[in-house]
């Protein structure tokens, strides 16, 4: 970003509440013809304006809601196919100096046992995850004054340094930590992070200020400009998000889209991913047990579908927080990345007494193991689990990635690469049942693949995988 822009952005709140309120008011009780018009535009896969998204959010006609889901499904199918990227969160520290009223890690929560993993403990946790078959991790950190960018960078190096078993290595480390300054972001960029993720929680500033009552996170604008600083530091892939339940969900969706557009205007590319956690019960937080703006299941599914239509090429991430059946519905309408086999406190993966409420951030909706989840998504639902990291390792990130994605590239590269990583998983980590179901799925996918040249390359690589080669991609 140019210097003059930097200064301008540090001073402005680019989330214009009154504009969003106007967009919402204008979209109230939309005529069915308008909803259909917006859906037709959505089908062109060029996205929607925030107002158009509001029209879909405000629709109350049941049949048209179904049409929204169908549109989202067909966009998802056309762009992403049946591939689903899997990752696990790895909590590095739950020490935190901030008072976020909804979070179990908040500084005033004296019941929580605090822990920051040492280098050795990180190695232990990562080895457990690698032995399950994980290749992509999301590192999660509380925000504590004693933990600076150098320390975060070291924890990333620690994770990348661990190798375990036959093909155990972490190939992409994404991180979710408090906003840094540009120098700090440069440090974590240099150690090779994939996506930098940080959620605004709520874009409604008065609500934000009410819910963040202590520590650095009280500064709304510092957080709002985190992605601009990250991109200025050279991080191409950023992930934004809002925590649903804190404020009006329509406002938050529109604000996410405005944030996205601002990044596009200032950096030529929007966010790589959007996350939409729903508020979950958390130790020591009244708000987490009684969300001020609860989002129903139907509403939440609509939000996912509308985001899929509004930003078709942006990855949509679903976390641990939703239960297994509901996850499946959300995947169908647009989710492209899923956390699996997750545990939400530091040291949890190597904890023999797992599931202790006195250390975790919030309660988990889906506690199945990675292999069980894979058996269900691949065996029962025909989704191809993918751990692919080829683009990031070949430098196909940010603007470059978006351009390629828009030209059918995802089908050409992501699907075969996803199949190759799935094969690797089946060879090295799967239970017998998952292996049978998974190999049958791979065979079906290869047979259906209609590019003869690529099919030949794919078949050759799958054979090489069976013969013991690893980490093959196109
Ligand atoms: N400390 C960093 C921060 O606040 O940005 C990153 C880690 S924080 C644990 C990651 C995310 O957890 C937050 O951005 C918030 O959206 C989410 N979170 C906090 N409390 C939650 C709750 N009770 N239910 C669901 N998600 C929650
Ligand atoms: Fe700390 Fe992040 Fe939890 Fe807030 S959301 S208390 S900053 S860990």
Image (cartoon, grey):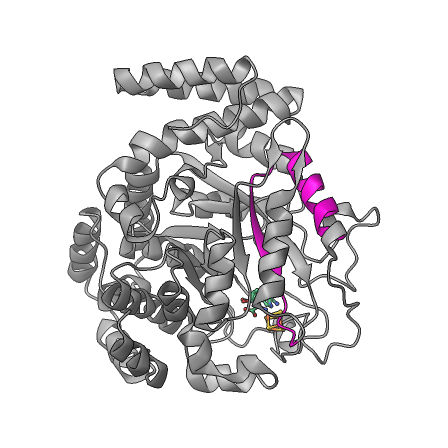
Question: Looking at the image, which is closer to me, 424 or 183?
Answer: 183
> Where in the figure is residue 417, as x and y percent of width and height?
41, 30
Where's the N terminus, which quadrant? bottom left
**Can residue 363 be seen?**
no
> Where in the figure is residue 210, as x and y percent of width and height?
53, 86
Q: In which quarter of the image is ligand 2?
A: bottom right
Drawn side of residue 435 relative to residue 66, left or right: right
Residue at screen point 23% across, 69% down? 51
Q: Give residue 265's quadrant in the image.
A: bottom left
Numbered range of the magenta stretch: 121-145
> Where in the figure is residue 105, as x and y percent of width and height?
68, 70
413 vs 161: above or below: above
> Where in the figure is residue 240, as x and y percent of width and height?
42, 63
415 vs 314: above or below: above
Whether residue 138 is in magenta: the answer is: yes
Where's the C terminus, which quadrant? top left
Q: Give residue 78's quadrant in the image.
A: top left
Residue at screen point 69% across, 66% down? 94
Residue at screen point 46% across, 46% down? 337
377 vs 38: above or below: above
How many numbered marks are there? 0
Whether residue 171 is in magenta: the answer is: no
**Can residue 32 be seen?**
yes
Question: Looking at the image, which is closer to me, 31 or 276?
Answer: 276
Residue at screen point 49% across, 53% down? 193
Residue ranking furthest to the right: 353
Q: Give residue 230's quadrant in the image.
A: bottom left
Question: Looking at the image, which is closer to me, 129 or 23?
Answer: 129
Question: Looking at the image, which is closer to me, 275 or 150?
Answer: 150
Drawn side of residue 299 relative to residue 140, left or right: left
151 vs 408: above or below: below
């Amino acid at each position: 970003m140019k210097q003059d822009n930097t200064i301008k952005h540090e001073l402005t709140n680019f989330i214009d509440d009154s504009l969003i309120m106007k967009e919402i008011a204008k979209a109230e009780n939309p005529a069915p013809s308008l909803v259909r018009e917006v859906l037709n535009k959505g089908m062109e896969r060029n996205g929607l304006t925030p107002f158009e998204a509001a029209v879909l959010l405000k629709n109350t006609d049941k049949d048209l809601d179904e049409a929204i889901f169908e549109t989202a499904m067909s966009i998802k199918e056309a762009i992403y196919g049946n591939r689903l990227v899997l990752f696990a969160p790895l909590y590095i520290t739950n020490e935190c100096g901030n008072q976020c009223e909804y979070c179990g890690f908040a500084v005033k929560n004296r019941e929580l046992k605090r822990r920051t993993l040492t280098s050795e403990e990180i190695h232990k946790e990562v080895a457990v995850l690698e032995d399950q078959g994980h290749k992509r991790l999301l590192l999660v950190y509380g925000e504590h004054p004693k933990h600076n960018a150098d320390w975060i960078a070291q924890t990333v190096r620690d994770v990348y340094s661990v190798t375990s078993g036959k093909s155990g290595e972490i190939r992409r480390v994404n991180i979710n930590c408090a906003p840094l300054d540009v120098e700090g972001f440069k440090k974590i960029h240099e150690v090779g992070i994939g996506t930098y993720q940080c959620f605004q929680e709520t874009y409604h500033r008065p609500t934000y200020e009410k819910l963040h009552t202590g520590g650095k996170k009280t500064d709304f604008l510092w957080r709002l400009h985190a992605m601009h600083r990250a991109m200025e530091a050279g991080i191409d892939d950023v992930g934004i998000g809002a925590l649903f339940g804190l404020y009006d969900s329509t406002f938050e969706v529109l604000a996410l889209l405005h944030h996205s557009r601002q990044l596009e205007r200032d950096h030529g590319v929007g966010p790589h991913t959007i996350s939409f956690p729903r508020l979950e019960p958390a130790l020591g937080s009244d708000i987490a047990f009684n969300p001020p703006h609860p989002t129903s299941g139907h509403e939440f599914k609509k939000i996912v579908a509308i985001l899929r239509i509004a930003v078709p090429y942006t990855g949509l991430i679903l976390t641990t927080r939703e239960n297994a059946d509901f996850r499946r519905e959300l995947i169908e309408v647009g989710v492209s990345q899923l956390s699996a086999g997750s545990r939400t406190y530091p040291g949890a993966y190597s904890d023999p007494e797992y599931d202790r409420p006195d250390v975790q951030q919030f309660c988990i909706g889906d506690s199945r193991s990675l292999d069980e989840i894979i058996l269900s998504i691949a065996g029962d639902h025909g989704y191809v689990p993918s751990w692919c990291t080829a683009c990031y390792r070949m430098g196909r990130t940010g603007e470059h990635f978006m351009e390629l994605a828009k030209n059918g590239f995802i089908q050409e590269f992501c699907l075969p690469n996803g199949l190759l990583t799935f094969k690797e998983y089946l060879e090295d980590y799967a239970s017998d049942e998952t292996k049978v179901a998974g190999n049958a799925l791979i065979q079906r996918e290869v047979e259906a693949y209609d590019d003869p040249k690529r099919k030949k390359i794919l078949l050759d690589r799958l054979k090489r995988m069976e013969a013991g080669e690893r980490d093959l991609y196109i």
